[in-house]
Amino acid sequence: MKLNEITRPIGITDGKKIVGRGAGSGKGKQSGYGRKGAKARSGRSKRVGFEGGQTPLYRRLPKKKGFRPHVRIVYVAVNVGALEGYEGEQPLDLNALYNAPVKLLGSGELTTKVSVRASAFSASAREKVEKAGGTCEVV
């Protein structure tokens, strides 16, 4: 490319559009706004979400009720009764076993001494594990 071959980008030389200066200019009389109507009036912009008289989307959808956090922990529920009969010296890591956050719930009976590691414990589950001689560790 040489200096004498450089050209300006297309559209960079277009001047400001001059309207309302007679029929010969190509933008006379209605100045490009057409005939009567909302689009020909001053302050003519429609509000955001206007759909031409059709009931807009924000009114067609029901109101969103309540609040749901963006980051929500979904626990896998495991009952204390499922731990009955576990024999082992190592603490039982439920998160590793299920490969997800686990909450231990208090349904069922527990007679074996078990050390449990989980993301969360219900009050009744913690009570049953400790009553059986085990321990609860939150991971």
Image: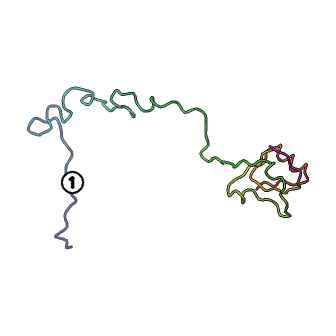
Quadrant where the image shows the N terminus: bottom left
In the image, what residue occupies the spot 69% across and 49% down?
76
Up the image or down, 56 lies above or below 130; here it is: above
Give the residue type that dot 1 points to.
Gly
Task: Please name whichever residue, 47 or 28, is drawn nearer the observer in this view of the structure.
Answer: 47
In the rendering, at what x and y percent does residue 138 appear? 78, 54
In the image, what residue occupies the spot 16% across and 70% down?
4
Task: Please name whichever residue, 28 or 133, is drawn nearer the observer in this view of the structure.
Answer: 133
Q: Residue furthest left?
A: 24
In the rendering, at what x and y percent does residue 60 appear? 44, 29
Q: Residue furthest front?
A: 85
Q: Is residue 110 magenta?
A: yes
Q: Residue furthest bottom?
A: 2
Asked if residue 130 lies left or right of residue 46, the reply is right
Q: Give the residues drawn in magenta, as a range.
A: 107-111
Quadrant where the image shows the C terminus: bottom right
Name the residue tied to disc 1. 11
Q: Secondary structure at mark 1?
A: loop
Asked if residue 37 lies left or right of residue 131, the reply is left
Task: Please name whichever residue, 74 or 65, is drawn nearer the observer in this view of the structure.
Answer: 74
In the rendering, at what x and y percent does residue 57 appear? 42, 33
In the image, what residue occupies the spot 80% across and 43% down?
107
